[in-house]
Image (cartoon, rainbow, N blue to C red):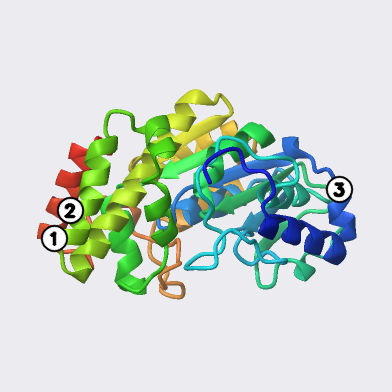
Amino acid sequence: MFKALGLKGTEREWLNAFQRSHPELFAYDGESDKLRLILGVGRSGTSWLSRVLSKSTTPLRFFNEPLHPFRPKLPFSNKYDHTAVPYCRSLGDDHPLVRVYKCLTLSDYDWDRLLPGKIICRDDRKFSFCLVKEVHALLATEALLKKLQCATLFITRDPVYVVDSLLSFRRLNAPIWQNESRYVRDGSFLVRYFPEEAYRIQKYYGKNARTFNKKKRIIMNKMLTVGIINKMLSSLADELDFVCHIRYEELCEDPEKIFKKAADFLSLDMEAGMLDYLSSTQKKNERDIGPYSIYRDTSQQLRRPLRFISDTEAEMGRTMLLECALI
């Protein structure tokens, strides 16, 4: 499962369905140099980062999480999240993930045929770059970026706050990271990224399953999985010179400086309009206060009280993350 992914039966079926449904895209080789990716686990600030950067005066196309609604439906898992893919070191040219990302750069296409809903948020006719924000299929990031070789931002956030933010509105039945919590326990992945901590990581997953009630088990497993994915992204950013790692906490402490750094890295112009929009997102907007709103009192985000996780559960989680060298 964790060797270089050739096309499995379900992936070959997907490729055939893709060719039948969208022959123009099937024949298109893509322009990876136009891609600009923003990747991170959900609830880490990916929306804030991508939406502000999408206000650049640079001509852009902007996709917001295209993998999950893409049609034909991606075939990686039939449980929890169909976009969840195990870790792999390489992907072939016809792998569905490579095909999807590359096809996003095709000009003059009816994207509603592939992406129902408001997934394409901006589409300048002569765009210079295709900005893509994504939170799914992150364990394939290493292989995907080695194939695409495009400028990419990673954003990470304290796992305690990530999980608290998720569970405060999705509650315990949220299926997110369920598949990943299994995939990250595979020996090949642990040897690649956690050669010294592999035993402790495996021990904590086992302890969580044996020791805790349902609520604590879910909280601890999600914290551990988020911490592992964050550490993987951080390690990749150290290895790949076309990747920049940004921490949500940095964005909150000095938004203008860090957004300027992000815009420069992606070769996006940052002018007055983007700065004004950034300023507007740093305070609450009573007309946009849902869980997906990017309008926050930014100065309070680093110290806000936990909403779902108790202080005791947070302390237990931090102890676990520290012992596994994940924070």
Q: Position of residue 247 (x, y in %)?
A: 38, 40
Image coordinates of residue 272 in percent, x first then y, are 59, 45
Identify the amino acid type marked 2: Lys
Q: Can residue 19 be seen in this view?
A: yes
What's the amino acid at mark 1? Thr
Q: Write the residue at 55% across / 44% down.
A: 140
Q: Please report the residue visible at 69 percent of the width from the left and 62 percent of the height from the top.
A: 120
- Give the residue displayed 67% in from the left and 60% down from the top: 10
Of tags 2 and 3, the one toward the viewer is 2
Where residue 49 appears, as percent x and y from the top left, is 50, 49
CA gap, disc 3 to disc 1?
Answer: 52 Å
Q: Mark 2 points at which residue?
A: 207
Given the image, on which type of amino acid does mark 3 rest? Tyr
Task: Report which residue position mark 1 lands on.
Answer: 211
Task: Find residue 168 and report its image quarter.
Answer: bottom left
Q: Residues within 10 Å of mark 2 (few under 14, many from 20)?
A: few
Vertical position of residue 307 compared to residue 50: above or below: below
For mark 2, give the secondary structure. Answer: helix
Label 2, label 3: how many angstroms apart (C-alpha)?
Answer: 49 Å
Tag 1–tag 2 contact (CB < 8 Å): yes
Q: Which of the two residues, 54 or 109, is positioned nearer the viewer here?
A: 109
**Which residue, given by chain and number where applicable, does mark 3 sit on?**
28
Residue 272 is left or right of residue 283, and the answer is right
